[in-house]
Amino acid sequence: MTDDRLNSTLSALADPTRRAILARLALGETSVAELAKPFDMSGPAVSRHLRVLEAAGLITRSRDAQRRPCRLNAAPLAEVADWLERYRLFWEASFDRLEDYLREVQSRGGERDKPR
Amino acid sequence: MTDDRLNSTLSALADPTRRAILARLALGETSVAELAKPFDMSGPAVSRHLRVLEAAGLITRSRDAQRRPCRLNAAPLAEVADWLERYRLFWEASFDRLEDYLREVQSRGGERDKPR
DNA sequence: TCGTTAAATAACGTAATGGTTAAATACATC
DNA sequence: GATGTATTTAACCATTACGTTATTTAACGA
């Protein structure tokens, strides 16, 4: 909704570690230690990434003994998708132009390819 | 495609000034000075935002006398949209649960609302 | 060639980001 | 209550990001 929310979501997504964490969470709830395993990174570093994701509302955390299982909350992604929709026509248009061009090149057969 | 491209696109989008610039460019090609007007920001600052957008492939620049008109290139946004699609089921599921909840609350009529 | 305009680059300051290790906290078990 | 395990917080460091003003480059027109 607000530009602020969109901003914190996009900022959270603009990091490969955090995107990987989200991908893992798409497979189901897990502990912090489990999330940290694939990364060559200290626990605290992962913990801070989780904090960013939580602040963006992309994950929620519960409590299970010493564990703090994390769960994906994809709702903020819907806002990003909505925002992107404004531009869909633009990228579809450019793909159409690309298709046109490829079709044209193909129809020219073996000639030297000269766009324009 | 590559995680790197997705990363530079998302990083470029994670700034309100740059998103506003894209929104302006969706209305058509413009000069740098024109783009800078709505912002309380120096020319060089805008110039650097444009550089980020260009590096991410979100804009292209041409030459018209002293002007360097910028044009939107939405293609990288398609990759973001593709990436997001992986999560659509998740956010739709959570909206479904929200709907269920709202329906339930409504069906309970005037009772005190107690989820769970 | 000189002056003007549009934009980019240089040089700089400051704040935010992303990582580290060491210490603190929360919970469970003995 | 002491010990072990999972996680967070504190303190710190290096790099990047974003802004500024001053200077430079590029293109035009008198």
Image: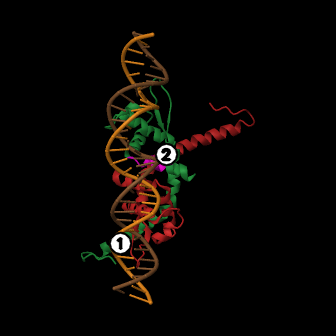
Chain colours: A green, B red, C brown, D orange
Residue at (54% x, 49% y) in the render: A5
Image quarter where the C terminus of chain B lies is top right
Point out residue A1 in the picture as x, y percentages from the top left corner: 58, 51
What type of secondary structure mainly makes up the magenta span? helix
Quadrant of res B56: bottom left
The subunit letter for the residue under badge 1 reads A
Label 1: few (<14), some (14–19) or many (≥20) C-alpha neighbours in 10 Å = some
Q: What residue type is disc 1 on?
A: Tyr
Please give the label number shown on residue B89: 2
Residue at (53% x, 42% y) in the render: B93
Using residue C11 as the reference point, say whether residue C14 is left or right of it: right
The subunit letter for the residue under badge 2 reads B
Image quarter where the N terminus of chain B lies is bottom left
Quadrant of res A33: top left
Reading the image, the residue beneath label 1 is A101
Point out residue D19 in the picture as x, y percentages from the top left corner: 47, 58
Query: SS class of the residue under badge 1?
Result: helix
Please give the label number shown on residue A85: none
Give the magenta part as a residue range: A8-15
Point out residue D26 in the picture as x, y percentages from the top left corner: 34, 76
Q: What residue type is disc 2 on?
A: Leu
Residue A102 in view, yes or no: no
Q: Is residue A56 above or below residue C21?
A: below
Query: SS class of the residue under badge 2?
Result: helix
